[in-house]
Amino acid sequence: MKEIQIVNYKVEEKIILPNNHTSENFNLSEKELEKKLSKTRKKLGDLQNTLYAHDKYAILVCLQGMDTSGKDSLIREVFKDFNVSGVDVVSFKVPTDLERSHDYLWRHYIALPARGRFGVFNRTHYENVLVTRVHPNYILGENLPDIKSIKDVNESFWDKRFEQINTFEKTLAENGTLIFKFYMNLSKEEQKFRLLRRLNKANKNWKFSPGDLAERKLWDNYMECYQDAINRTSKPHAPWYLIPADNKPAARLIVASILLQELKKYSDIKEPELSPKIKENISEYKQQLQNEL
């Protein structure tokens, strides 16, 4: 298998979401895909250590996708070889009362990774132009000064929100955060299969919610919103990648490979050099330790 070509997944021009495939296997078995992932994530883990020592960049990994698209298991498998102290995973669910008392980006700002660290957003600030766009009545719960009724949640409102998100990401990028946004492109047929599996397997029942079926009925609405959001916000400093998500092992390998290939382009990410004085005395320090009683 040749190196995964990032250009096949990176959004650099307007996309039509239904025209993008949802499954990939690279003509490899599940075991072969897992073996390649194991090698790739080991290299990512080594790079993480260097990034931590370098302490100049933060890495923000954003995962979006419909229910059952494999975000949780992807996080578990792709970041398995990371030092847990260098990666923070945040899952954004329904906003709390405290979060609603601030602007919608506040809870994302305070969860951002520090320099030298990876941050993974499982669902992201894009929920505020996806779920809320499909369900505009949710915006009323934000208690915004200019929103008196659903009629005020119009195209002008969404234009402004997309502008705010683009500004948010540009500010992060200009201050040393490298942003990767992955859309897990799941087919409706595969989602049906995964939901049925949750119902058929007793140990998976806890993952199911009747709300999943209600949201599934709005599939086409979500696809329109995802397509618009991706087209409006895929920028050179914060690109979107469309990941075929029907085959979980392949999806994990693609995400890990994109992260590794893109981060390796930053040739300045190196472990800091010791000061000349310490270098000169390394032999002496070794001797001191060896001579300890």
Image (tube, rainbow, N blue to C red):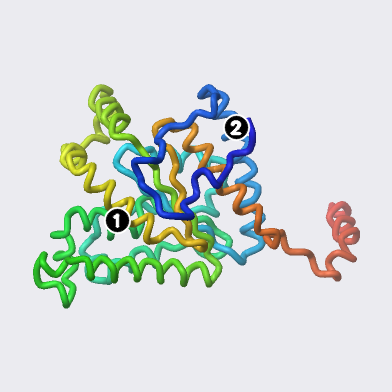
Q: Secondary structure at mark 1?
A: helix
Residue at (38, 38) in percent of width and height: 70
Image mark for residue 127: 1
**Residue 29 position in % (x across, y down):** 53, 22
Please state which of residues 87 and 37 is positioned toward the viewer in this rendering. Answer: 37
Residue at (86, 64) in percent of width and height: 279
Image mark for residue 36: 2
User: In terms of sequence position, does the residue under pointer 1 or pointer 2 come before the other?
Assistant: 2
**Residue 57 position in % (x across, y down):** 58, 64
**Residue 91 position in % (x across, y down):** 35, 51
Q: Secondary structure at mark 2?
A: helix
Give the amino acid at mark 2. Answer: Lys
Q: Is residue 173 visible?
A: yes
Please state which of residues 225 and 81 is positioned toward the viewer in this rendering. Answer: 225
Q: Is 3 drawn above or below residue 127 in the view shown?
A: above
Please tell me how crowded label 2 is: few (under 14), some (14-19), or many (20+) other residues with Cα within 10 Å: some
**Residue 167 position in % (x across, y down):** 41, 71
Q: Is 104 drawn above or below residue 20 in the view shown?
A: below
* Quadrant of the rendered image containing residue 26: top right
Residue at (63, 35) in percent of width and height: 39
* Quadrant of the rendered image containing residue 207: top left
> Would residue 266 appear left or right of 285 to someone viewing this image?
left
Give the amino acid at mark 1. Answer: Glu
